[in-house]
Structure formats: structure tokens, C-alpha cells
Image (spheres, rainbow, N blue to C red):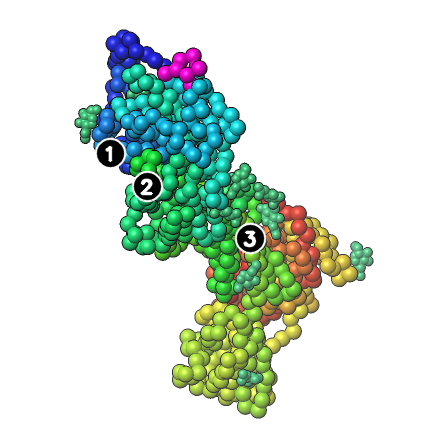
């Protein structure tokens, strides 16, 4: 503290000049509250969040002193931030630059709020507060960053007889004091074995705050000074500064004991509790006193005293006995707050609470002493690695993962699945993510991703089981401190592939019977005859009966039924002596296509794979399986063999590929669809056939190219063996009646070879290729064919 007596007028002018440059804003958003022997300013976060705030104290002349950490310790200020960015600023009513009277103190603070780290272009606010306070003979304040003691000046000179137990009594310090250069304003520190006298100005240079008010003498010390000693009382270490201040009053030199002691390791933590114990026998504060009278303890939060009822309601416990005051606060109790943190990449939480204890007692030396300890308690980091729960129900075909719980200050930022990172906005847009708020305010997140999303990996396990693999990493951010962490899990769900209904049949004396073994896809398959469902519970068409149980159903068609027959792709035929043929269809296409009676004949077809687009050389039987790369075109030719009838024409109705030689198996990929080049992706191209030395009857052949495609199974490229199959129709122009299959409008011109629509009797035949092995290496960007699922 600099003595600046004699300059007030000049400095007043200077400081108003400084003030003239800035227009202080309205400080109404800052609340000032008188709390015990302090004044507290509250700055709500919306005004100061992400801003750079400077506090300065104004003295009576309007001079401004910026409060650094060091000045705060010396002059009685403390600033704390909570996690939401609210700022609390506390000043002792005896802080430097306060105008202190016996009944009240007036403090004027200047607050500069700048958006810039260099604190440039601030908006300046001035806040003044006047707080009445009735001082006790001695007041000791243990703030979070300083210790302060003030004593009434009307203390009689200390008599030697007052210290019977202390060999290094106060009067023995007297020679040092009077021997000093300036005997007024001197302080003598009592160290463990010696004493150290200092001028007040020197003590202030080393960080002490020493001053007088109208009626009091004041010493303020940081916790760690050269003269502070660590001493243990009860189980607790205290920082102790023992000092005597010498001052001149009129013609006598007076000295006053200005010892101060504050606990430094008085808090213990368990996983559930905070325990705070403060012993009462702090001997440096009790020198000379024989007994404590009317000892009273107040406890509270945020400098407000709590009643016993409030203490009980909040589940705190305060135990006070003549030796010690012990407070327990359950972690999480009301009055404090939790905060999320990341340590070493791990999520965890802390709990913070601002508490105080105030012990007031009376003794025969000091009269009344008020001893106040303020503590900002924060529990040690408590790791809370989030629990990731796999709540996938395979039948829903969706991954269902929950992760949590977290405090509400945790934000989900992104989710990485495999190599793809989706932001929360994207996930929300897809409806993949939701957050769950729990009654206690904590949150968790739920991720739901369909198995069919391409970011899900599919692996095949055996023939009928596939593994859906979700390798997921959640990315989080904690606000407002922007600490980030991640959490990962790999979930594998095994799903049996669809098993389709499997029909088989047999004939007995009077009926044809189709037994269908239900698959696992859907228990509700219903066979139809034309538009009529063959439902057990309903009336069934004449001559047809259905019986069913949980695994099979059986359709019986009475031999002499008048019903028409039905066509498709799976035929079960029975031959009866009537020379009539029955064709019963079971299929997954609905409704079934109409069919006609058929006459049997000898039709032989061959499906060949040409070595190139000239259709001159073909792979022979010994060359199968033929290995092809995914992008390579395949040239197929179907030929009607052993016919010399130029009126016959072969049409391809359907061609498709399967992964097994069984043409009815799945997966299945369309190549020629309803006599047309497969339309969805135009991967199939018909090629015209012209007569040459090998081809006598071009109408007996069809050629098509399956062009550079990828077989996709789900969103996965299929590699391995595939087999091609075609169903062909042989139409005869000489027949008198028209056959709808021969006149289908969809038969494209290149197949039709210009024939009229009067083509007639059809023969219907399947033909299959040998195995073609598809090797991967295809570019993924080419058009994809998707598996057909029933
Ligand atoms: C001492 O207290 C007086 C009165 O409050 C004040 O004017 C002065 O600035 C203080 N001195 C120091 C060095 O703090
Ligand atoms: C406190 O003191 C100031 C002068 O320092 C005076 O203006 C104010 O009225 C006083 N307030 C109270 C409540 O006594
Ligand atoms: C007190 O401080 C000493 C020295 O730093 C330390 O060894 C001791 O453990 C502390 N006592 C308690 C109770 O923490
Ligand atoms: C804290 O716990 C330690 C170990 O149990 C004990 O030695 C110490 O006395 C406790 N401190 C307080 C202030 O209770
Ligand atoms: C951080 O984690 C590493 C590896 O798990 C461990 O070795 C290290 O001790 C941890 N550090 C802290 C401060 O917990
Ligand atoms: C999960 O993905 C990460 C990359 O995102 C990878 O490093 C890790 O090996 C994957 N884990 C498994 C089991 O596939
Ligand atoms: C395959 O991925 C595409 C987008 O890339 C998506 O539209 C389609 O639904 C997916 N299909 C399957 C069967 O997963
Ligand atoms: C995902 O979020 C985490 C945590 O916030 C972050 O570290 C990571 O960089 C983010 N990843 C991407 C690709 O943005
Ligand atoms: C946290 O991140 C946000 C958004 O990136 C940013 O505006 C803010 O300044 C950051 N806060 C801190 C304390 O770094
Ligand atoms: C996740 O849950 C599904 C369904 O219960 C189960 O099939 C799968 O094995 C589980 N995966 C993991 C990694 O626990
Ligand atoms: C269902 O019917 C089939 C064929 O009639 C029979 O083989 C099977 O045992 C029956 N299953 C049950 C559970 O009754
Ligand atoms: C099949 O073709 C290969 C290669 O062109 C040839 O060596 C072989 O003799 C042929 N086999 C038959 C039975 O034609």
C-alpha cells in the first residue's frame, strides 16, 4: 500500500480523465449482496459467458486498482466461476479501498467485460454496495485464498501476566519493536524459534495486508507466506501466522496480537460423503484465555446460514462438541452441483459445494471472537465410464444400443460406425438417435440403426446365418469447458436367413397333395386358387381342401375337381389314366398368373456361355466352372435342339441367377424379366441371331448379354458360384388358337424377329447353365442388382 497522502486532488482529476473515455453501462444485471462480513457480486453467465472479465476496486478518489490474484490475496477479494459460467466475486468488508466506518462499509467495484482475450474494447460497469455490519472484538475470516484477522483497537496494552504459559511472551517482543527504525507501524512475526520484525511497508511488499480503520487493526495474509507455519490441531493441519502489530496511539505504543490460523486439509472424501472437521482448540487463537464461553456454531451454504430443519432436509449432518465441529455432506446433496469432466480419456464427475462454518465464542482475553471458514469444496474426480447396453432384438432387424448415464452437461457430438461418421444432426434426421432424460436430471442416449443400413457390416456364418456387425464409437463433448471423450462397442447379432416355405407333393388314389413346410419368414403365408385364399377357416372351393398345423399345411386337390389348373414356376404333376394333366402351383407371387392345360412333348433346350460376343465358341462341359470377373460381360445363348420346324420360335420368358444349382433357391437375381431385358438397371441386352453355318433356324435361338454387373446381396457384393436359369416358351405359328404367353406385349422386338402375334401353342421348359464363378475386383460404383426377397 502506497502512502499517497497529499495527492488526492490531482489523482482525482486524473482518474476522472480516464473515466471520461468510457461510458459505464448499466450494471443492473449485477447483483450485490451483503453476506456476513463480505459483499458478493453475482454476474449471470449470459452476460459473461465466453467473455473476459476484469474486476477492479475503486478507492475513495475514484482511482481504479485492477485485481490480480496477488492483489486479491493481499486485499481481500475472491473470484469463483461455476461450470455454467456464472461468476461470483466476494470482497471482505475490510478489503483495501473500501470506505469503512464502524457501522458499515462501502465498496465500489468496476467490472470490465471484453469479448477479446487481450481484454480490449471492454464494456465497463460500476457497482457500488454498502453493507452494515456490527463487528465483534475479534473477527477471523478464512477465505478460500486468504486469511484475515481484525481486532478492535480499544485493547489495553498487553500485560506480561496474561501469558503464563508462553515463554516467548508478547512483552519479550517489545525490544525488537522499539529498536526498529520506525517504531510506529511495525509488525513482529513469531516464528517457531525466533521472531522477525518488519516495517509495515515491507510486510506489505511480501504480500501482507496491514491497515487500520477508525476502530480496528487488520492483518491479512495469503495461506503460504515465509512467516506462515503449518501446525496440527486435532487431526487437521492449519496455516498459522502469529504476529504482533505495534502501533502508536497518542503518546503510547500499543501492541496487539494479530494471530490468524486457518485449516488447510480439513476435508476428507469417501465415495458417498464429504466430511469436514474443524477442531475448536486452535491454541494460537486462544493464548491467555482460560475457558470458552457461549460457544455457538453456524453452518451454511453460499454464505447463508441454514436452520437445523434445513440441514436435516438436505441430509447434511452437523455435529458440534467442545472439541470439534464435524459436518458431513452426502455427495450429490442439494446445495451443490455435479460437473462432468474427462481425465485420461475417461468420463467422470465431480461434486462441488460452497460451505461455511462460523464459530462464535467469548473468552476472558478477547471478549467475543467470530471465526468464519469459507470452503469451496470439489470432490476428487470420480470415473464413471458410461455403460453401453445392447438391447437389440434381432426380430426387429434393428440395432438398439443405449449409452449412459451422463450429467446434463454432456452432449453427443457424433457417432462413427465403421468408417462413417455421422453428426448428431444427421442421426436425428435419420431418426437413429434419441436422448432419454431421467427423473434425476441425468441423460442417456439411444441409438437405433436398421440392419439394412449400408454402414452395418454383414458377415456370413455358415449357409443360413448372417452376422450383422455394428462397430460403433460415440463422440461426446462436455459444455461449457469443451472436454471431449469417446466410447466404443462392437455388437454382433446373428440372424438366421429367411427360410422360405418348402413345398413337396405326392399323389394318392383320388387326389394330388401339396405339403408346404412353413418357412421362418412369416407364419401367415396363404395359398391362393385364383383369387380365393385357401384358408382353413373359410369355405374352400369345390374339390380342394386345406389342413394346417404350426409347421405345415397340406393342400389336397380332388382328382375329379372341375376347377381349372394354375400355372407358375414350381410344378408338381401327377399323371392319371384320364390322359389329363393337373398342374398345381405354389408360388410367392400374388396373385398367381393364369395358366392353361399343357400337352407334353419333347423339347430339349441348351443354355450355353459363349467365349465372346461373336457367339462362335462356347465353354464346353469340362471347362465349368467358368471363372469371370465381376465386371466382365457374359454372353449367353439358348437353343432349341433337335427341331427342324421353321415355324417354331423360342422365347425367353424369365432368366435369373442363383447361388446354387437349384433354380428355386435364394438369393435370386433377375436377368430376363417377363420376356424383357431386365429393366431396373438395363444390365441385360438381347442380341439378334442370324443364320450362319452353325445356325440353321435363327428363330430357334436367343442370345443375350449380361453386362458387367455386380450381384448384390443386401448391400454386399456377392462373390462365388452362380448358376443361370431360363424358362423358355416355344410358340408355333401354325397352331390355330392363340396363346397369351406367345402374344405377350412385353416381348420385345429383338426377340420377336418380326413375327405376327398369331403365334400359338407354347411349350414351356427350363434350362440351366453350369457354374460361373464370380471373382471380386469389380468397381463398387457400377450399377447394382439387388437380391429379390419374396
Ligand atoms: C488503509 O485503509 C484506509 C481506510 O480504509 C484506506 O484509505 C487506505 O487505502 C488503506 N491503505 C492500504 C495501503 O490499503
Ligand atoms: C454507509 O456509509 C455510507 C458512507 O460511507 C453512507 O452514505 C450510507 O448511508 C451508510 N449506510 C448505512 C446503511 O448505514
Ligand atoms: C499435515 O501436513 C503434513 C506435512 O505436510 C503431512 O505430512 C500430514 O499428512 C498432514 N496431516 C494431515 C492430517 O493431513
Ligand atoms: C482424513 O482421513 C485420514 C485417513 O483416514 C485421517 O488420518 C485424517 O485424520 C482425516 N482428516 C480429517 C480432517 O478428518
Ligand atoms: C491414464 O491411463 C493409462 C493407461 O490406461 C494409465 O497407465 C495411466 O496411469 C493413467 N493416468 C492417470 C493419471 O490416471
Ligand atoms: C472398429 O472400428 C475401428 C475403426 O473405426 C477399428 O479400429 C476397430 O478395429 C474395429 N473393431 C472391430 C472389432 O472391428
Ligand atoms: C443399400 O444402400 C442404399 C443406399 O446406399 C439404400 O438406399 C438401400 O436401402 C440399401 N439396401 C439394402 C438392402 O440394405
Ligand atoms: C467426433 O466427436 C469426438 C468427440 O467430440 C471428436 O473428438 C471427433 O473428432 C469427432 N469426429 C469427427 C469425425 O468429427
Ligand atoms: C467450446 O466450443 C464452442 C463451439 O465450438 C465455442 O464457441 C466455445 O468458445 C468453446 N468454449 C471453450 C471454453 O473453449
Ligand atoms: C446384442 O443383443 C442381441 C440380441 O439380444 C444378441 O443377439 C447379440 O449377441 C448381442 N451382442 C452383444 C455383443 O452382446
Ligand atoms: C404338422 O403336419 C405335418 C404334415 O401333416 C406333420 O408331418 C407334422 O408332424 C405336424 N406337426 C405338428 C406339430 O403337428
Ligand atoms: C473343351 O475345351 C477345351 C479348351 O478349349 C479343350 O481342350 C477340350 O478338348 C474340350 N473338351 C471337349 C470335350 O470338347
Instruction: State the mark number for residue 134.
Output: 1
Vertically, is 277 above or below 623? above
Q: Residue at x 40, y 43 (%)?
A: 280
Is any part of residue 94 visible from this angle?
no
Label 3 – label 2 distance at C-alpha: 60 Å
Q: Quadrant holding ligand 10?
A: bottom right
Q: Earlier in the sequence, mark 1 or mark 3?
A: 1
Vertically, is 59 above or below 462? above
Q: Quadrant where the N terminus lies?
A: top left
Which mark lies nearer to you, 1 or 3? 1
Q: Secondary structure at mark 1?
A: loop
From the viewer's perspective, tell me whether residue 728 is left or right of residue 615: left
Location of residue 307 in the rendering, given as x and y in whole percent from the top left corner: 28, 50
Which mark lies nearer to you, 3 or 2? 2
Residue designated by label 3: 489
Is the CB atom of the residue marked by disc 3 within 8 angstroms of ligand 10's nearest atom?
yes
Location of residue 266 in the rendering, given as x and y in whole percent from the top left corner: 45, 43
Label 2 – label 1 distance at C-alpha: 15 Å
The residue range painted magenta reads 177-184
Q: Residue at x 30, y 47 (%)?
A: 306
Indicate yes or no whether the magenta region holds residue 297: no
Amino acid at each position: 500500500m502506497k502512502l499517497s497522502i497529499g495527492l488526492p486532488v490531482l489523482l482525482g482529476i486524473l482518474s476522472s480523465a480516464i473515466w471520461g473515455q468510457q461510458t459505464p453501462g448499466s450494471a443492473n444485471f449485477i447483483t450485490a449482496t451483503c453476506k456476513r462480513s463480505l459483499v458478493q457480486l453475482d454476474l449471470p453467465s449470459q452476460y459473461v459467458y465466453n467473455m473476459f472479465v476484469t474486476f477492479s476496486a475503486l478507492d475513495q478518489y475514484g482511482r481504479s486498482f485492477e485485481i490480480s490474484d496477488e492483489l486479491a490475496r493481499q486485499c481481500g477479494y475472491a473470484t469463483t466461476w461455476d461450470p455454467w459460467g456464472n461468476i461470483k466475486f466476494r470482497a471482505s468488508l475490510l478489503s483495501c479501498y473500501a470506505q469503512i466506518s464502524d457501522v458499515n462499509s462501502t465498496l465500489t467495484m468496476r467490472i470490465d467485460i471484453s469479448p477479446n482475450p487481450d481484454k480490449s474494447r471492454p464494456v465497463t460497469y460500476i457497482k457500488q454496495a454498502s453493507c452494515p455490519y456490527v463487528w465483534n472484538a475479534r473477527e477471523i475470516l478464512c477465505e478460500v485464498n486468504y486469511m484475515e484477522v481484525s481486532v478492535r483497537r480499544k485493547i489495553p496494552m498487553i500485560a506480561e501476566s496474561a501469558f503464563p504459559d508462553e515463554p516467548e511472551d508478547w512483552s519479550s517482543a517489545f525490544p525488537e519493536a522499539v529498536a526498529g527504525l520506525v517504531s510506529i507501524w511495525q509488525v513482529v512475526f513469531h516464528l517457531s524459534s525466533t521472531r522477525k520484525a518488519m516495517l509495515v511497508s515491507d510486510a506489505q511488499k511480501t504480500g501482507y495486508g496491514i491497515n487500520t480503520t477508525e476502530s480496528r487493526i487488520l492483518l491479512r495474509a495469503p495461506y503460504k507466506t515465509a512467516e506462515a507455519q503449518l501446525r496440527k490441531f486435532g487431526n487437521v493441519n492449519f496455516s498459522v501466522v502469529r504476529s504482533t502489530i505495534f502501533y502508536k496511539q497518542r503518546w503510547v505504543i500499543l501492541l496487539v496480537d494479530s494471530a490468524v490460523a486457518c485449516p488447510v486439509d480439513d476435508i476428507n472424501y469417501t465415495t458417498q460423503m464429504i466430511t469436514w472437521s474443524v477442531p475448536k482448540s486452535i491454541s494460537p487463537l486462544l493464548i491467555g484465555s482460560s475457558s470458552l464461553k457461549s460457544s455457538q456454531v453456524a453452518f451454511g451454504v453460499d454464505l447463508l446460514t441454514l436452520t437445523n430443519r434445513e440441514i436435516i432436509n438436505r441430509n447434511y449432518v452437523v455435529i458440534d462438541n467442545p472439541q470439534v465441529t464435524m459436518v458431513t455432506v452426502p455427495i450429490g446433496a442439494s446445495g451443490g452441483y455435479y460437473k462432468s469432466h474427462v481425465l485420461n480419456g475417461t468420463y467422470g464427475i465431480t461434486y462441488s459445494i460452497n460451505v461455511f462454518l462460523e464459530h462464535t465464542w467469548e473468552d476472558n482475553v478477547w471478549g467475543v471472537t467470530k471465526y468464519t471458514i469459507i470452503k469451496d469444496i470439489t470432490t476428487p474426480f470420480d470415473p464413471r465410464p458410461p455403460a453401453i447396453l445392447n438391447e437389440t432384438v434381432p426380430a426387429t432387424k434393428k440395432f438398439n444400443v443405449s449409452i449412459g448415464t451422463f450429467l446434463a452437461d454432456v452432449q453427443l457430438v457424433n457417432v462413427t460406425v465403421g468408417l462413417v461418421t455421422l453428426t448428431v444432426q444427421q442421426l436425428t434426421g435419420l431418426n437413429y438417435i434419441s436422448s432419454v432424460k431421467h427423473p434425476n436430471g441425468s441423460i442417456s442416449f439411444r441409438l437405433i440403426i436398421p440392419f439394412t443400413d449400408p454402414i452395418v457390416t454383414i458377415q456370413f456364418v455358415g449357409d443360413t446365418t448372417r452376422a450383422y456387425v455394428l462397430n460403433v464409437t460415440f463422440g461426446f463433448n462436455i459444455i461449457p469447458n469443451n472436454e471431449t471423450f469417446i466410447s466404443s462397442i462392437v455388437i454382433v447379432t446373428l440372424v438366421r436367413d429367411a427360410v422360405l416355405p418348402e413345398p413337396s407333393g405326392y399323389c394318392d388314389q383320388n387326389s394330388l397333395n401339396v405339403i408346404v413346410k412353413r418357412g421362418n419368414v412369416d407364419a401367415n403365408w396363404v395359398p391362393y386358387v385364383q383369387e380365393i385364399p385357401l384358408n382353413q377357416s373359410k369355405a374352400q372351393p369345390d374339390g380342394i381342401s386345406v389342413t394346417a398345423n404350426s409347421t405345415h399345411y397340406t393342400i389336397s386337390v380332388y382328382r375329379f375337381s372341375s376347377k381349372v389348373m394354375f400355372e407358375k414356376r414350381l410344378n408338381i404333376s401327377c399323371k392319371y389314366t384320364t390322359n389329363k394333366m393337373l398342374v398345381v402351383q405354389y408360388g410367392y407371387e400374388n396373385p398367381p398368373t393364369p395358366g392353361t392345360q399343357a400337352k407334353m412333348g419333347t423339347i430339349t433346350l441348351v443354355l450355353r456361355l459363349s467365349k465372346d460376343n461373336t457367339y462362335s465358341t462356347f465353354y464346353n462341359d469340362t471347362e465349368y466352372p467358368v471363372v469371370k470377373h465381376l465386371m466382365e460381360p457374359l454372353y449367353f445363348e439358348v437353343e432349341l435342339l433337335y427341331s427342324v420346324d421353321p415355324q417354331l420360335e423360342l422365347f425367353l420368358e424369365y432368366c435369373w441367377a442363383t447361388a446354387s444349382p437349384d433354380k428355386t433357391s435364394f438369393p435370386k437375381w433377375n436377368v430376363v424379366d417377363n420376356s424383357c431385358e431386365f429393366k431396373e438397371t438395363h444390365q441385360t441386352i438381347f442380341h439378334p441371331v442370324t443364320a450362319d453355318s452353325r445356325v440353321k433356324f435363327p428363330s430357334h435361338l436367343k442370345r443375350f448379354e449380361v453386362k458387367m454387373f455386380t450381384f448384390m446381396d443386401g448391400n454386399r457384393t456377392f462373390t462365388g458360384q452362380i448358376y443361370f436359369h431360363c424358362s423358355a416358351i416355344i410358340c408355333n405359328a401354325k397352331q390355330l388358337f392363340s396363346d397369351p404367353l406367345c402374344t405377350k406385349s412385353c416381348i420385345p422386338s429383338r426377340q420377336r424377329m418380326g413375327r405376327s402375334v398369331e403365334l400359338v401353342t407354347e411349350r414351356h421348359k427350363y434350362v440351366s447353365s453350369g457354374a460361373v464363378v464370380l471373382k471380386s475386383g469389380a468397381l463398387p460404383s457400377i450399377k447394382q442388382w439387388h437380391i429379390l426377397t419374396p
